[in-house]
Amino acid sequence: MSQAPQIDRRPKRFPPPEFPPRRAALFAKTPPAVFPVVLGLLGLGLALRRGLAGTALAEPLEALNGGLLGLWLFAVLALLGKVLRRPGVVVQDLRVLPGRAGLAAATMSGMVAASLILPFVPGLAVGLALVSLTLHAVLAGLLIATLLQMPPEAREVNPTWHLSFVGFIVGAVPLALAGWTGVAQAILMVTLVAAAVIWAVSLAQLIRRIPPAPLRPLLAIHLSPAALFATVASLLGQPVLAQAFAAFGAVILLALVIFARWITLAGFSAMWGALTFPLAAYASALIVTGGGFALPGLAVLVAATLLIPPIAWNVLKLWPGGRLAARTNAAEA
């Protein structure tokens, strides 16, 4: 007769708590979620430059833009410190929605920074734009590889796909201004196709089911491609295309305004960073497109100036102490 297996009834052993608690290494938990609002602030600075050109405020504004570039550089160095400590954190951050949106916004912010410094150091600006585009392509490839290893429900199209797969269009702005029109045109045509697919799939999904309240602020990202297509088309001398996307952006923005209460129903979170850069990009687009779009562009710029800084501040103040990292599931190096 076989004996019944013995069961160890002793309590499970756990390691003793550390005292004082272990502190993460400097920048080891840098949350990528800081970059959507950094991108929004840089975009606002660029929009203000365009809207205030030729006024007495133009020169003081450049001092403000210098400060914003300092914030961007600090955030980049913090993220770089984390990645160099353990490169595998990149893939870990790509596995969560705030992480993949933040990493895409990080490289996009480099492209906006290139636009900001272009009038002063054109060669450095073009170099920064090209490096940012290259890193963005690397991240897009890593994201595809990561998504293929995840369950099907994690691979569904969502608005952040615009950042990863259409975000290249941000780099076309400084390149078009620097005279690299052929490259800018190629980026415009390729990203147009990607954005059209994402818009179509996202619309079908929105008709089938209502997104959960915490993710609804991400719907604002759909405005970004329309805004940037209008800007790049204007810079490339294609006014009809620019006006078409400026008008399409107006439809998206109107829908966002009408459903603003529904979109923000879950209350403030780091996801509100997605409300910042599309608004700044659309203000720029209307001003650059000009004509009948210029005055509405100034109105959108005023709204962006009132909304973006408070949202950015409320996200950025969560960064010290690790609260933003904890709330967005940021990986630790």
Image (tube, rainbow, N blue to C red):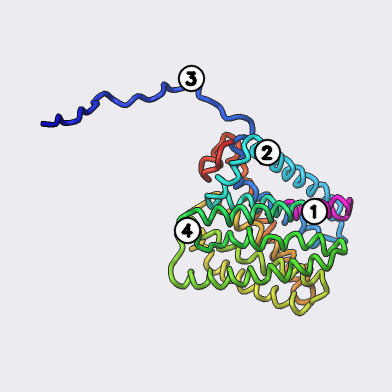
Callout 4 amino acid? Leu
Q: Position of residue 257 (x, y in %)?
A: 57, 67
* CA separation in Å, label 1 and label 2: 19 Å
Does the magenta run of residues contain 152?
no
Residue on which the image places disc 1: 114
Residue on which the image places disc 3: 19
Front tag of 3 and 4:
3
Question: Which residue is at a point 46% across and 59% down the rendered structure image?
Answer: 152
Question: Which residue is at a point 79% across and 55% down the rendered structure image?
Answer: 130
* CA separation in Å, label 1 and label 4: 36 Å
Q: Which residues are magenta?
A: 110-130
Do the CB atoms of the residues marked 1 and 2 lie less than 8 Å apart?
no
* CA separation in Å, label 3 and label 4: 41 Å
Q: Which class describes the residues within 10 Å of circle 1: few (<14), some (14-19), or many (20+)?
A: many
SS for dot 3 = loop
In front here: 278 or 151?
A: 151
SS for dot 4 = loop
Residue on which the image places disc 4: 265
Displayed quadrant of residue 212: bottom left
